[in-house]
Amino acid sequence: MLAAIQAKGGKIKPTHLMYKANLSYTQLCGYLDELVEKEFVREAASEKNTNNSYIIITEKGDKFAQKLQEMRQFERAFGF
């Protein structure tokens, strides 16, 4: 989910995230609650329309996603 948010420039609508991460609405809500609790993402209302919201990756979430990607590259490089 964090990678999908990063790919969209750090900000994505919940519905788009649901499709990008191939999740059901129930799964999305559960995972988002956990990510918000861990301060990896935050929810923000749209500036133009308060009915629309966005999921925004935080600096902490961005760093975590980068470290995870580095670990995966290390894993592939050494065949783990």
Image (cartoon, grey):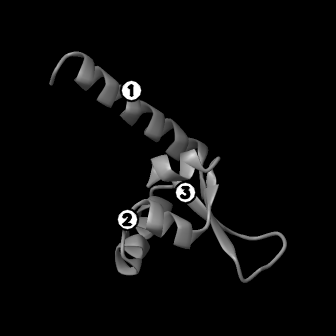
Q: Crowding at label 2, few (<14), some or many (≥20) Cα neighbours within 10 Å? A: few
Res. 38 image quadrant: bottom left
Q: Closer to the observer: label 3 or label 1?
A: 1
Give the SS element for disc 2. Answer: loop
**Quadrant (top left, top right, bottom left, bottom right) of the C terminus:** top left
Instruction: Check contact, mark 1 vs mark 2: CB within 8 A.
Output: no
Task: Kindly identify the amino acid type of the residue bearing the numbered disc 1.
Answer: Glu
Question: Mark 1 or mark 3, which is nearer the start of the sequence?
Answer: 3
Task: Kindly identify the amino acid type of the residue bearing the numbered disc 3.
Answer: Val
What whole-number distance in Å separates the C-alpha atoms at marks 3 and 1? 20 Å
Viewer-proximal residue among 49 and 43: 49
Question: Mark 2 or mark 1, which is nearer the start of the sequence?
Answer: 2
Residue at the far right: name it. Answer: 48
Image coordinates for residue 46, horizontal then vertical, percent: 76, 71
Q: Is residue 51 above or below residue 14?
A: below
Residue at the far top: name it. Answer: 78
Image coordinates for residue 79, horizontal then vertical, percent: 16, 20
Give the SS element for disc 3. Answer: strand
Q: Which residue is mark 3?
A: 41
Residue at the far bottom: name it. Answer: 51
* Dot label at residue 22: 2
**Residue beneath the point at 44% across and 69% down:** 33
What whole-number distance in Å separates the C-alpha atoms at marks 1 and 2? 23 Å
**Residue beneath the point at 37% across and 65% down:** 22
Question: Mark 3 or mark 2, which is nearer the start of the sequence?
Answer: 2
Give the SS element for disc 1. Answer: helix
Image coordinates for residue 16, horizontal then vertical, percent: 54, 67
Q: Which residue is mark 1?
A: 70
Task: Kindly identify the amino acid type of the residue bearing the numbered disc 2.
Answer: Asn
Residue at the far left: name it. Answer: 80
**Residue beneath the point at 82% across and 69% down:** 47
